[in-house]
Amino acid sequence: MQQFLLSIIVPVFNEEQNITPLFNRLLPIVTQYNYEIIFVSDGSTDNTLSQIRKVAGENKRVKYISFYRNFGHQMALMCGYKIAKGDCVISIDADLQDPPEIIPEMIKRWEHEAMVVYAKRNKREVDSFFKKQTALLFYRFVNFLSDTPIPQDVGDFRLLDKEVVSFLNNLPEQSRFLRGLVAWGGYPAQYVYFEREKRNAGKTHYTLSKMVNFALEGITAFSTKPLRIASYLGFISASIGFLGIIYTIVEKLFYPSHLVTGWSALFVGTMFLGGVQLLTIGIIGEYISKIYHEVQKRPQYLIKEQFNT
């Protein structure tokens, strides 16, 4: 058995049908290491916690934490990172779309001085066309606006050295976009490639609206470019308005017979300026909301139950 301690973090939300299958696939892999498995139930409302209790009762290396309510996937991961004691920490979802069988390869990369090992999807044949295109758009959009490049086609299935985990745990900020924070650290990183599998059971909890919110969270956490774009839009709309004034004056002075009074130009101009203003206010509002949450300094999650931690 290896001397280092391996921590496996599994954030779960309503995954009652996936707990036992995941554990059965994880166990033959991790038994060759000194390991701990940490389940974080993010306010599950089904029998997920009961299934976790059953697994924990059979294996003393299994730990679990349960939240009072759903605080979000990133908060569940952060809770796991704070509890984990491992020299290297691997996070993996319970739906088995990310195969546990590549964990030994991830550990080998870590043993060869990689402090971050990303599990990168080289094929996503099981995903729908819409899912693949929205994921592609998500990464392109985030990387276009973000000041910190985020690796494409990687999720939260990754290995982190304990130094990287300590860095994440010591960050003072309330909102956590972990894919960006891990990349922002600039730690030596490598990739292990895999083919994405079908979800074992249940339905995905990552809806389009959640992905949009996730993208907004990542952009506002790592870039001020949207504010700059809002300034550009304001400058452009003001310039168009100024040119329109000059055009109207010239027409009235030199070509009064050509001047036609109508509602179309007024309507288009009003809609354009109104749209720019609302967009700008929305962008500014996103940043103000982040400041609001940072100032509140509320707990990131509330623990209802924990075992063996």
Image (spheres, rainbow, N blue to C red):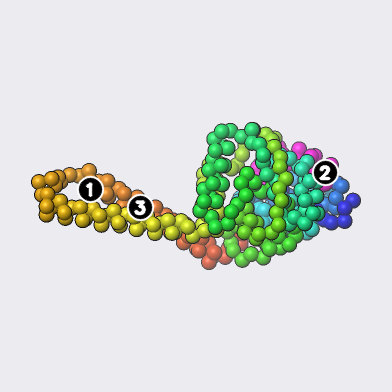
Amino acid type of the residue tagged 3 in the rendering:
Val
**Element assignment for label 3:** helix
Rounded to the nearest angstrom, the CA distance separating label 1 from label 2 is 68 Å
Q: Nearer the viewer, mark 2 or mark 3?
A: 3
Closer to the camera in the image, 204 or 115: 115
Q: Of the two numbered discs 1 and 2 on the same chain, state the one appearing first in sequence.
A: 2
Badge 1 is on which residue?
266
Amino acid type of the residue tagged 1 in the rendering:
Leu
Q: Which residue is rendered at x = 57% and y = 65% of the image?
A: 297
Q: Is residue 122 visible?
A: yes
* Magenta stretch holds residue 72: no
- In the rendered structure, the answer to whether residue 244 lies left or right of residue 60 reads left
Q: Of the two numbered discs 3 and 1 on the same chain, state the one appearing first in sequence.
A: 1
Q: Which residues are magenta?
A: 11-30
Q: Nearer the viewer, mark 1 or mark 2?
A: 1
Badge 2 is on which residue?
29
Rounded to the nearest angstrom, the CA distance separating label 2 from label 3 is 55 Å
Neighbours of disc 3 within 10 Å: few (<14), some (14-19), many (20+): some
Residue 119: x, y in percent?
70, 46
Residue 28: x, y in percent?
84, 42
Residue 276's disc is 3
Amino acid type of the residue tagged 2 in the rendering:
Ile
- In the rendered structure, the answer to whether residue 200 lies left or right of residue 241 reads right
**Element assignment for label 2:** helix
Closer to the camera in the image, 52 or 25: 25
